[in-house]
Amino acid sequence: LSKAMRHLDSQRRCTLVKHGLLKVHFMNLSHEVTQRRIEQLSDMAQVPALAKLGSPNHSLPPIILSEHEGGTEHEVKCIRHMFDSHMVLQFEVQNNVNGQNM
């Protein structure tokens, strides 16, 4: 019985450690999402027409519009920002070819 109790206690401690690691991972992801959101809002505030709209009610996750082939020259993403009476489409283009500027 003592061996079974030690095994259960070991499993409980292992589960607590895994839980703690998952919490840290979640907090890191939350921080990254928050930082990205702040960058997007800052970029939009620099455009006078968008600044007049205020802050978006919510933004949807990026949609990748380019093909997912490994050899694509560029990647295009679209982020949709929802306002009270407007929707703003933000396109991000990333060049994947070294030595070539877009």
Image (cartoon, rainbow, N blue to C red):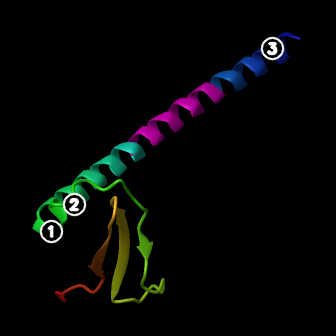
Q: Is residue 83 left or right of residue 102?
A: right
Disc marking residue 49: 1
Q: Residue at x 42, y 85 (%)?
A: 66
Q: Position of residue 88 (x, y in %)?
A: 30, 70
Q: Amino acid at mark 1?
A: Ala
Crowd rating for badge 2 (residues with CA inside 10 Å; few <14, some 14–19, many 20+)? some
The C terminus is located in which quarter?
A: bottom left
Contact, mark 2 vs mark 1 (Cβ under 8 Å): yes
Quickly name the residue at label 2.
53
Q: Quadrant of residue 62?
A: bottom left
Give the extent of the magenta segment.
Answer: 15-28
Q: Secondary structure at mark 1?
A: helix
Quickly name the residue at label 3.
5
Indicate which disc, 1 or 3, sits on the residue closer to the N terminus. 3
Q: Amino acid at mark 3?
A: Met
Q: Secondary structure at mark 3?
A: helix
Asked if residue 43 shows in the view, the reply is no
Crowd rating for badge 1 (residues with CA inside 10 Å; few <14, some 14–19, many 20+)? few
Q: Residue at x 22, y 56 (%)?
A: 41
Q: Is residue 2 left or right of residue 39?
A: right
